[in-house]
Image (tube, rainbow, N blue to C red):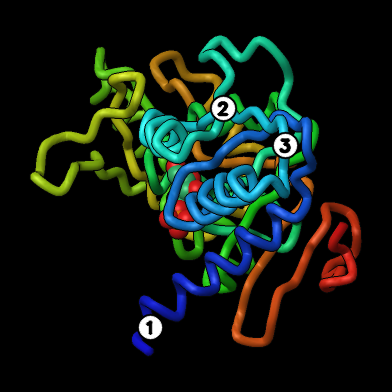
Amino acid sequence: MGDETATSMLKRQAAEHAVAFVQSGMTVGLGTGSTAIFATRHIAALLQEGALREVVAFATSVAVRREAESLGIPLLADDMPRAIDLTIDGADEIDPRLDLIKGGGGALLREKIVAEASRRVIIVADDGKLSPCLGTRWPVPVEVLPYGWQSQARYLATLGAEVALRRDAAGAELRTDQGNLILDCRFGPIADAADLARSLAARAGIMEHGLFLGIAHDVVIAGCDGIRHLRRGGGGAAGLEGRP
Ligand SMILES: O=C(CO)[C@H](O)[C@H](O)COP(=O)(O)O
C-alpha cells in the first residue's frame, strides 16, 4: 500500500469516528477538504440506510454543497436560518492546545463562519497534522479583498511573513468562493498566535485568516496506532470509549 493510500485511510477513519457523534434530527456543518469529505459521504450513507434521520446540513464551501446535493443530503438555505449542532471539519496543523491552522482548501472564511455558529466543532485529521507549535509546518492562509491586495501583502511582510499569492493548478490567481484572493503567509513557529490573530483582524482588506484559536472542541486523530479523541481542556486522549 502506497503512502497516499495509507494517509487517505487514516483520514477516513478519523472522519467516520466523528460521524458517530451525529444524531438524528441534528443540523450538521460539513467541512471542506479530503478528510472532511469522508464524513460527508458517511453521513449520506447513514441517511440512505435509515441509520440517521432528519439530518439537515450546511456546507462550508460551494464544492461541498454540490457534493452534498449530489449525495442527497438535505441542506439549509445559505443564510443559515438556524444554529448548527455539530460541525465536522479538517485542519492543516493542530497544536497541543487544539488550536489550528485551516484554509489549505481555501475555504477558511466560510469554515470559520460555520464553526463559530456551531455548538460543537470536531476536527478530524491524520496524525501528520499534529504540530508542537502553529506555523512550524504550514503557512497561515490569509483571505484578502482583491482591491488593494498588494498593500495587504506588504503589511503581512511587516508582521514577519514570507508571503505567496496562492495560485490554482493552471497558474492563475486562486479565487475563493467569495471572489477574494489568498495570501499564504509563512511565519515559521508562531510564538503568540493570539497576538498575530489580533494584528490580522485589525487590518482593513483582510477578510479572514486561517488561525482557528479556541474554536475546536474535539480533535479526532487517526494514526497507525489507532484513533485518539482529544478534547479541549480535557487533558488529552480519551480513546474509543468516548464514542456515543
Ligand atoms: O481548511 C481546510 C480547507 O479550507 C481543510 O480542512 C484543510 O486544508 C485540511 O484539508 P485535508 O483534509 O484535505 O488535508
Left or right of 182 in this view: 173: left
At label 3, which amino acid type do we have? Arg
Would the CB of label 1 be found within 8 Å of ligand 1?
Answer: no
At label 2, which amino acid type do we have? Pro
- How far across and down, in percent of the image, does residue 69 sit? 44, 31
What's the CA distance linking mark 1 and mark 2?
Answer: 35 Å
Disc number at residue 158? Answer: none
At label 1, which amino acid type do we have? Asp
What's the CA distance linking mark 1 and mark 3?
Answer: 36 Å
For mark 1, what is the residue? 3
Vertical placement of 47 versus 204: above or below?
below
Query: Circles 3 and 2: CB distance less than 8 Å?
Result: no
Toward the front, the furthest residue is 49
SS at mark 1 in the image? helix
For mark 2, what is the residue? 74
* Image quadrant where residue 93 sits: bottom right
Query: Circles 1 and 3: CB distance less than 8 Å?
Result: no
Vertical placement of 23 versus 35: above or below?
above
Q: Residue at x 78, y 65 (%)?
A: 229
For mark 3, what is the residue? 53
Vertical placement of 31 versus 190: above or below?
above
Camera-side mark, 1 or 3: 3
Regarding residue 139, the answer to whether it shows in the image is: yes
SS at mark 3 in the image? loop
In which quadrant will I find the C terminus?
bottom right
Q: Relative to the observer, which residue lies in front, 43 or 215?
A: 43
Q: Relative to the observer, which residue lies in front, 61 or 178?
A: 61
SS at mark 2 in the image? loop
Q: Residue at x 66, y 10 (%)?
A: 81
In which quadrant will I find the N terminus?
bottom left
